[in-house]
Image (cartoon, rainbow, N blue to C red):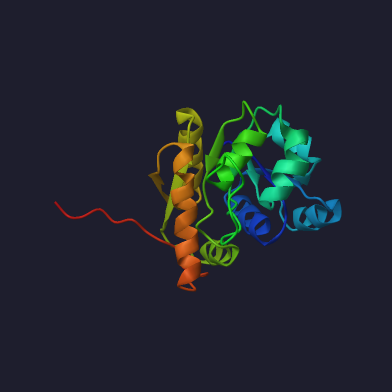
Amino acid sequence: MDLRIGIIGCGRMGAALARLVDLHGMSLLLANRTPARAAALAADLPGARVAPPARVAAESDLTILATPIDATCHDLAPRIRHARSVIVDVSNPCFGVPAAPGHRSAAQRIAAALPGSAVVKAFNCLSARWIAAHTRSPTLVTVPIAGDDPAAKQLVSTFCKTLGFDTADAGPLANSRCVEGLTELLLCINADGVGVRLIPASP
C-alpha cells in the first residue's frame, strides 16, 4: 500500500504501531514531544524519519495521534489544525472521569479541536502489548472504525486490512463513544492482551 503514515506520539502505543507499519514497508514520519525519543525509534525502523508534528500531519496521508487526549486537544491541535492528512484517533478517555462538557467521546473532543479535519476512530480497542504480539505473530481481529467522512473511513479501513486486521464500520463519529466503551469492557475483565473478532453467523 503506497501510503505515507505519520505517527505523533512515540510511547508504547505509538511505537508498537510504528513497528507494525514499518514491517509492512510503508513510509513513516514520526514526531514526539521529546524529539530524541522519536529519533531513537526511527533509528530502529528503516522506513522512518523524524519531523515536527506540523510537518508530519502536512506530509502524511494518515496521521495517527498516539498522544493523551488532553495533550492532543490543548497542545497538539493548534499545530496541526490545517493539515490535509486524515486523522486517526487511537485514544481512550479517562474512564471513571466525567466527560468534557459537550462531548460524549474522546474522538469528538479531538474533532472539535481540529475543525475541518477528517477524524476517524480506530485501534483504540487494541493495547500496545497486543499490537506488539500481532507484529510477531499475526492474528486476525476486528478493528471497529467510526467517522463522518466516508472516504477517510475507507482509507483507514484499507490501511487496517493491509496491517492484517479485519474491520467493522461502527458508523458516524458520534458512535465512537460505543467503540471506546468496548475498551472499557476489556479493561474491566482484565483483558489487556485480548483482541476481539466479530464472526458473522452462518446462514
Which quadrant of the view contains residue 77?
top right
* Residue drawn at point x = 61 percent, y = 41 percent: 109
Whether residue 2 sits left or right of residue 33 in the image: it is: left
User: Which of the 4 image quarters holds residue 41?
Assistant: bottom right
Q: Residue 22 placed where, x, y %?
A: 63, 51
Q: At which x and y percent is residue 143?
A: 45, 51
Give the left or right position of residue 16, taking residue 41 as reference: left
| Horizontal side, residue 53 vs residue 87: left or right | right
Where is residue 13? Give x, y as percent.
64, 58
In percent of width and height, residue 135 lies at 55, 61
Question: Residue shown at 47%/39% (left/top)?
Answer: 174
Q: Residue furthest left?
A: 203
Q: Outermost residue, bottom direction?
A: 190
- Decide which of 202, 162 is in the foreground and name it: 202
Question: Would residue 119 be visible to someone looking at this image?
Answer: yes
Q: Residue 47, can we see it?
A: no
Q: Quadrant of residue 103?
A: top right
Q: Which residue is located at x 71 percent, y 54 percent?
A: 45
Height in image: 126 above or below 58?
A: below
Q: Nearer the viewer, residue 103 or 175?
A: 103
